Image: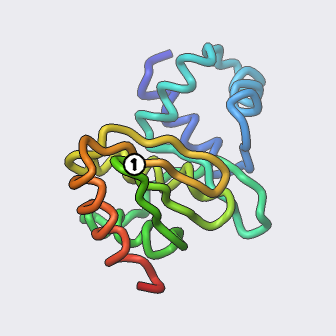
Amino acid sequence: MKKEERQAIIERVIVQNRIGTQEELIKILKDRGIKATQATISRDIRELHITKKADNTGQVRYVVYKHQPADQSERLYKSIRDNVSRVDQVQFMLIVHTIARNANGLGAVIDDYQIPHVLGTLAGYDTLVLICDSVESASQVGSMIKQHMKNA
């Protein structure tokens, strides 16, 4: 099976089902006669911009970011506005506090946007760490995030 076909099926499965783990996704694909390794599925998830997010029942599941604003910066600002509750700076790092279960989704948006001077992100349950290349860069990125927070 071609990569594009497999990815189209993965996208459809995630939209139509509540999938919370790669293992669940692999099982559904296997039931449909599609064999794929965990590494392949992981790569497909990343390429399709699929991330985990809490749904309206509070369960974490995969979601496809297809209906996002066309402008990348608006997508970033909306994600900040909808998810960030507080930002703290520790030298060259930013500790971004989010709504429960949404740090990973925000991290994916930030990674996609490729904010200058942000070298990487590390997401937990409700905390996202942004590692910047300098104290000054962390301060600038922190100011940008605070500017776009709902309670700013």
* Residue 109 versus residue 144 in the image, above or below: above
Please give the name of the residue rendered at 46% of the width and 83% of the height, measured from the top-left corner: 150
Foreground of the two, 25 or 147: 147
Q: Position of residue 19 (x, y in %)?
A: 72, 43
Furthest toward the front, the residue is 91
Q: Position of residue 36 (x, y in %)?
A: 61, 15
Please give the name of the residue rendered at 36% of the width and 50% of the height, measured from the top-left corner: 91
* Residue 100 versus residue 121 in the image, above or below: below
Q: Position of residue 39 (x, y in %)?
A: 56, 17
- The residue tagged with tag 1: helix, strand or loop? strand
36 left or right of 73?
Answer: right
* Residue 71 versus residue 38 in the image, above or below: below
Foreground of the two, 42 or 33: 42
Task: Identify the image quadrant of the C terminus.
Answer: bottom left
Identified by mark 1, the residue type is: Met
> Mark 1: few, some, or many residues within 10 Å (few <14, many ≥20)?
many
Furthest toward the bottom, the residue is 151
Please give the name of the residue rendered at 52% of the width and 52% of the height, measured from the top-left corner: 128
Foreground of the two, 141 or 112: 141
Please give the name of the residue rendered at 70% of the width and 63% of the height, measured from the top-left corner: 55
114 left or right of 93?
Answer: left
Residue indicated by mark 1: 93
Q: Position of residue 40 (x, y in %)?
A: 53, 18
95 left or right of 19?
Answer: left
The mark total stands at 1
Q: What colouring method underlies this structural image? A: rainbow
